[in-house]
Amino acid sequence: MINLLRNQRLVLLALAILCFGATGLAVLLGHVFELEACSMCWFQRIAFLLAGAGFLLAAAWPPGGILTRRFGEAGLLLALASSARQSYVIAFPESADTSCGAGLSYYAQIGAWDKFFRAGLMGGSDCAQDQPQFLGLYLPNWSLIAVLGVITLYVAWMIWRRRQA
């Protein structure tokens, strides 16, 4: 196990697989519960894909590893911000006074990416309504747990690497 942790490419590949797997699971659960993904849900999926792509590129192209890892880190931070906000809105629906906004296809059609970015990070009261539960938690809570899990693994690996150096 320790030898696997020393191989930077394998660890980054594993992180990428976790990010892609979490995105796939979110899409699958959305279909199972017959949900139309709101802006925050799409934003979290795209942020996870950005993180996975960054880690995958870092694993495949070591000379650009620092830059591409930063893309992965940025994706994780964006996913963390959005999933934490959505979990907060679900717990305190009165804190969101605006509408969550349309889905990704609407913003893509009109080219309003700045509005999608804002809706993905801030959300609205719609994001707290009609949320199904899976094993006692709402889906955005599971997204938050997944993001925190990947961040924890990544930070623990970075700390371990520094101690080994």
Image (cartoon, grey):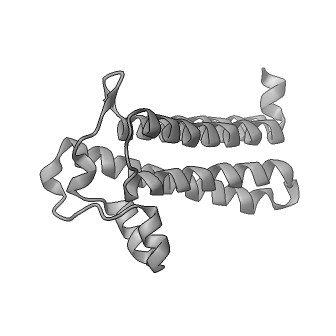
Of the 4 image quadrants, the one containing the N terminus is top right
Of the 4 image quadrants, the one containing the C terminus is top right
Instruction: Looking at the picture, tell me which residue is in the foreground, 161 or 92.
Output: 92
Instruction: Looking at the picture, tell me which residue is in the foreground, 134 or 9.
Output: 134
**Residue 59, image x, y percentages:** 81, 47
Q: Is residue 7 above or below residue 2?
A: below
In the image: residue 79, left or right of residue 162: left
Query: Extreme left residue here?
Result: 94
**Residue 143, image x, y percentages:** 44, 40
Residue at 50% x, 54% y: name it. Answer: 77
Residue at 52% x, 34% y: name it. Answer: 149
How many discs appear?
0
Residue at 15% x, 62% y: name it. Answer: 97
**Residue 81, image x, y percentages:** 41, 54
In the image: residue 134, left or right of residue 98: right
Residue at 16% x, 49% y: name it. Answer: 93
Q: Quadrant of residue 12?
A: top right
Q: Quadrant of residue 130?
A: top left
In the image: residue 85, left or right of residue 97: right
**Residue 120, image x, y percentages:** 39, 61
Instruction: Looking at the picture, tell me which residue is in the foreground, 125 or 162.
Output: 125
